Amino acid sequence: MLITTQQACERLAKVHLLGRNQALRILQSGLAGPRTRVGSAYRYDSDAIERLLARPRSTDEALDRHRPFIARIGRARHFDPDATWEEQRADVATGWYLPSLAYQQMRPRLPVPFLATLGAWVVFGAEITGYERSLHPAVEPREQPPDQPQSKRPQNRRLPPASLVLGRPGDWFSEFEDTWLPIENGATWTLWGALNSTPPRADPRSMYYQDQLEEERFLKRLYSTGRHRALARTLEGLVVDDRGER
């Protein structure tokens, strides 16, 4: 059965807590099956979406055993799930901003398993055998007002991006192929088991999934920047009203 883009996005968001932009990226990439143009809009095969959602979660044992480098493919990075392995490697190998600590953690373990994900789903596997610094100068950070806290992010971007030297994956990749990874939305990359690892996500197949899902949604609301801004505006309004009464 064909469903609308809105219905497809809602289905992906309901199961995997994806935002609309993430869901659209998955649909447009073809990961959830080809899209069909009907009039001026696109329709998606609901069965293909359910097959994607039915992919199993990778096991904690496999993640702990192989401790992969997990790369999130963002909107600015081109990636075609149907391209050849060599073409996909070219798309994911370059443009990574990695601190020295990440190199120090990976160097003794080379080759390090490499997994690339769209949303939460594994779409590419390789092995990191080395890395190369770009010869191009890094982008100069934007000037910040003197009365504003100095962000550390621009300082990190003064370093040139790295290109990962990727080789074909070994037998270990069979444990991750056609699975999804329990990682939160966040930084563009995660080294599993390192200090920068994000907490696991809820598993839709778990008997405790609904409880875990509610906890995730509660935490998202609790730490939401939009929520904090709304509270700040509310408190500001209360202060103004209080001053008026005085």
Image: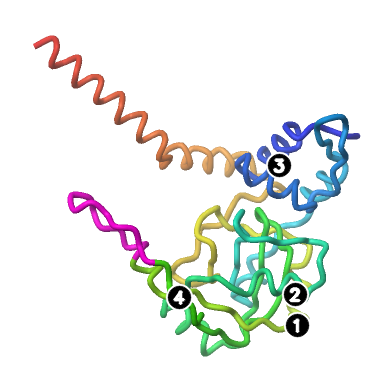
Quarter where residue 78 is shown:
bottom right
Distance, label 4 to label 2, CA atoms, is 30 Å
Asked if the magenta segment contains residue 145, the reply would be yes
Q: Which amino acid does label 2 sit on?
A: Phe
Distance, label 1 to label 4, CA atoms, is 30 Å
Residue sitting farthest toward the top: 245
Q: Is residue 67 left or right of residue 176?
A: left
Relative to the observer, which residue lies in front, 44 or 134?
134
Q: Name the residue under label 4.
A: 160
- Residue 199 on image: x %, y %: 51, 57
Q: Which of marks 3 and 4 is nearer the N terminus?
A: 3
Q: Is residue 10 above or below residue 124?
A: above
Q: Give the number of the mark in front: 1 or 4.
A: 4
Which mark, residue 170?
Answer: 1
Q: Which of marks 1 and 3 is nearer the N terminus?
A: 3
Asked if the magenta segment contains residue 81, the reply would be no
Mainly helix, strand or loop, the magenta region?
loop
Q: Earlier in the sequence, mark 4 or mark 2?
A: 4
Looking at the rendering, the stretch of residues picked out in magenta corresponds to 140-154
Residue at 48% of width from left, 38% of height from top? 218
Q: Name the residue under label 2.
A: 173
